[in-house]
Image (cartoon, rainbow, N blue to C red):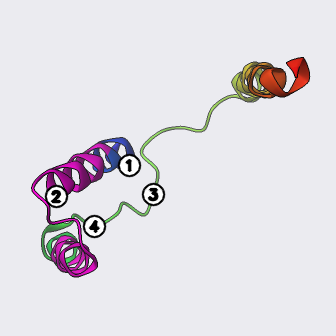
Amino acid sequence: MGFLTGSAVLSLLVFLLATIGLARKGVFLIVGLLAIGAAVRYGRPRQLDPSFNPLPRLWKWFFVAVFSAFTVYYLVTAMEPEYKS
C-alpha cells in the first residue's frame, strides 16, 4: 500500500512543481534529498517476520490462473491496433 500512495504523492508533487514553474533538475534533487532524509529520520523499521500465514497451494494456483488469463487478454488487446493495419 505504501508504494501506491507514494507513487500518487510523487505524481502530485511533480505536477505541482511543473505547475508553478519549478520543474528543474536542482529542485528535484533537493526535494529528493529531503524525502530521503525524512524517510531515514521518520521511517518505521521493517518487520523481520511476516505477520500473515502463507497462502494455501490451491489459492496460489488460482491466482496464477487468473493473472495468466488476464495477461494473455491484455497482451492481445494491446497488440490489436497493430494487427488491424
Horizontal relation, residue 79 to residue 25: left or right: right
**Can residue 83 be found in the magenta stretch?**
no
Which amino acid lies under the numbered mark 2 shown in the image of this protein? Leu
Mark 3, residues whose alpha carbon is within 10 Å: few (<14), some, or many (≥20)? few
Horizontal relation, residue 37 to residue 65: left or right: left
Q: Distance between the residues labelled 2 and 4?
A: 30 Å
Q: Quadrant of the C terminus?
A: top right
Image quadrant where residue 41 sits: bottom left
Horizontal relation, residue 79 to residue 9: left or right: right
Outermost residue on the front side: it is: 85
Q: In this view, does 18 lie above or below 45?
A: above
Q: In this view, does 68 lie above or below 25?
A: above
At x 60%, y 38%, the residue is: 54
Judging depth in this view, the residue of 66 and 80 nearest the camera is 80
Mark positioned earlier in the residue sequence (2 or 1)? 1
The residue wearing badge 3 is: 49
Residue 45 is labelled as 4
Q: Position of residue 12 (x, y in %)?
A: 22, 46
Report if residue 80 is visible in the image: yes
From the image, state whether disc 3 or disc 2 is nearer to you: 2
